[in-house]
Image (spheres, rainbow, N blue to C red):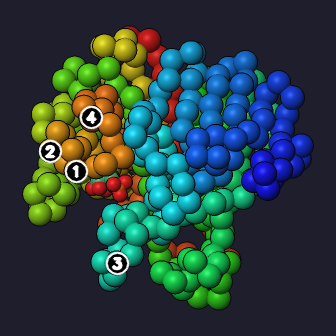
Amino acid sequence: MEALAGITDLDREFGIPGLASVVEGNGGLPKVRITSPQGTGEMYLHGGHITSWKPAGDEVLFVSSQSRWEDGLAIRGGVPVCFPWFGAKADDPKAPAHGFVRTKAWQLESVTQAGGAVAVSMFTENDDSTKRWWPADFRLVHRATFGSELSLELLVTNTGATSLRFEEALHAYHRIGNFERARLHGLDGIHYLDKTDRNQEKTQQGDIVITSETDRIYLNTQGAVELEDPVLRRRTRVTKQNSRTTVVWNPWAQKARALSDLGDGEWTQMICIESSNVADFAVVLKPGQQHTMKATVTVAGS
Ligand code: TA6
């Protein structure tokens, strides 16, 4: 009852009639539902997590049918926010993978109309739960604009008195018709760390086609990538700013079976393309400094 009241209050405060409303989502978790003339979308306060974007009717993001929807667990699919570390925490194997912000409740900062689109801002800050893992004082804002394109901004502010170093990723799960026919353009000749092969550094030859478990960190690249999907007859382009790494992931069959929150065979319908700053491209901020990473997704018919 209390959670519902909270959702009703949030909707009263932030809802825009006909465009955006705060409603109860899966697991009773509050979400912002966007129905703009240019496209629809969904963003959960849990993890500041986008779970849907449909610019022209077709869903662009993949969400697992077996995803969990509860405090303390990450949603499998959509756009998880990884911060302040990526993957395992270098100095603490007990720390949660991909940091702690994707498993906690964020707060709604604003919902505004932006032309024919709708912009939603959510934020989270340091608290007792974050200090358990990381001593820094910070404010993290995820601003998403849902329209004919999806633009994402991750704004980090060092609100403390000492410098902080962080990794970040917008761990986007893109829905594909079939992994065998999809091709990812734009990383030819780029060096990458192969996480399936002891983080060996290698060089990408040509387009990326998923033919086995793929888990790679492309280094020192600010370029755009384009996902060609002949089955869904579309090309999805991701451009980015202030992001110097791109992670590409598909678990393939075996790893997918080990993920209890990924439905059987669903690995064939997804590829993660992650605008990020990880590994040697982690960001250092002095007290009071800010950093904004941006990614913009556009879809065209093919
Ligand atoms: O982004 C790729 C990756 O780091 C992979 O190594 C794989 O672990 C994936 O993220 C999913 O991580 P998760 O913690 O969500 O199961």
Q: Check whether the beta carbons of the residues at disc 4 and disc 1 lie within 8 A of each other.
A: no
Q: Secondary structure at mark 1?
A: loop
Residue 7, relative to residue 237: is it above or below? below
In the image, is 282 to the left or to the right of 2? Answer: left
Of pointers 2 and 4, the one earlier in the residue sequence: 2
| Residue neighbourhood size for the residue with mark 3, other residues' Cα within 10 Å, grouped as few (<14), some (14–19), many (≥20) | few
Q: Is residue 196 visible?
A: yes
> Circle 1 sits on which residue?
258
Judge depth for marks 4 and 3 and give the one in front.
4
> Given the current orientation, which residue lies at the most extreme right position?
12
At 41% from the left and 35% from the top, the residue drawn is: 65
User: In the image, residue 20 lies at what x, y percent?
Assistant: 77, 33
Q: Amino acid at mark 4?
A: Asp
- Residue situated in front as seen by the camera: 156 or 262: 262
> Circle 2 sits on which residue?
254
User: In the image, residue 273 lies at what x, y percent?
Assistant: 37, 41
Q: Amino acid at mark 1?
A: Ala
At 46% from the left and 32% from the top, the residue drawn is: 61
Q: Check whether the beta carbons of the residues at disc 3 and disc 2 lie within 8 A of each other.
A: no
> Circle 4 sits on which residue?
264
- Residue situated in front as seen by the camera: 187 or 255: 255
Q: Amino acid at mark 3?
A: Lys
Quarter of the displayed picture in which ligand 1 can be seen: bottom left
**How far separated are the C-alphas under marks 3 and 2?**
24 Å
User: In the image, residue 77 lies at what x, y percent?
Assistant: 43, 42
**How far separated are the C-alphas under marks 4 and 1?**
10 Å
Residue 31, relative to residue 18: is it above or below? below
Label 1 CB-ligand 1 distance < 8 A: no
In the image, is 22 to the left or to the right of 169? Answer: right
Q: Amino acid at mark 2?
A: Gln
**How far separated are the C-alphas under marks 1 and 2?**
7 Å
Of pointers 3 and 2, the one earlier in the residue sequence: 3
